[in-house]
Image: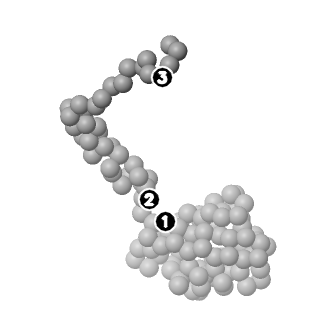
Amino acid sequence: MESLDEIETYHLTDQDWAIIDERLAEKYNQDNWNFGANPGFNQYRRITFEKGAIIFNFAVENGQISKMAIYGDLLSRKHADKLQELLTGVSYDAASLTATLDKRFVKHATDANGPERLAESLLS
């Protein structure tokens, strides 16, 4: 082949377009495909400190944190996972959150007032 003009062009038929539209509706026009599965989080907080940011995705049911995911560059993955575990099931009030967040690794990553600030931000 010496020229692009020699390549045969296929024109989609009405039947082709009907099949394409059907496939779009079945798979690609679904929220799950476009946005991913929602694990049930209904709260989002991003808190920034001098050393970095921490992001909380969580759900609260019956006055307790029922699900928690933590991201960001403030904590190592190991510490983020540990904090997720500690916060899941905790009462959603200032005293309980502050007590749970009052850990050496949290203070080291944030500052001396980090646990109180995080608790306040989670509640706002």
Q: Residue at x 33, y 25 (%)?
A: 10
Asked whether 37 or 77 is in front, the reply is 37
Coordinates of residue 77 in the picture (x, y in percent): 68, 57
Inspect this view and state whether residue 26 appears. no
Q: Which residue lies furthest to the top in this view?
A: 1
Asked whether 24 or 84 is in front, the reply is 24
Say which element carries label 1: strand
Which residue carries the number 2 mark? 39
- For disc 1, the neighbor class at 10 Å (few under 14, some 14 to 19, many from 20) is many
Q: Do the residues labelled 2 and 1 touch (CB within 8 Å)?
A: yes
Q: Residues under labels 3 and 2: Cα distance? A: 49 Å
- Between circles 2 and 1, the one closer to the viewer is 2
Q: Residues under labels 1 and 3: Cα distance? A: 57 Å
Label whose residue precedes the other's in the sequence (3 or 2) = 3
Coordinates of residue 67 in the picture (x, y in percent): 49, 65
- For disc 2, the neighbor class at 10 Å (few under 14, some 14 to 19, many from 20) is few
- Which color scheme is applied? one colour
Coordinates of residue 81 in the picture (x, y in percent): 63, 60
Which residue carries the number 1 mark? 67
* Vertical arrangement, residue 71 with respect to residue 97, above or below: above
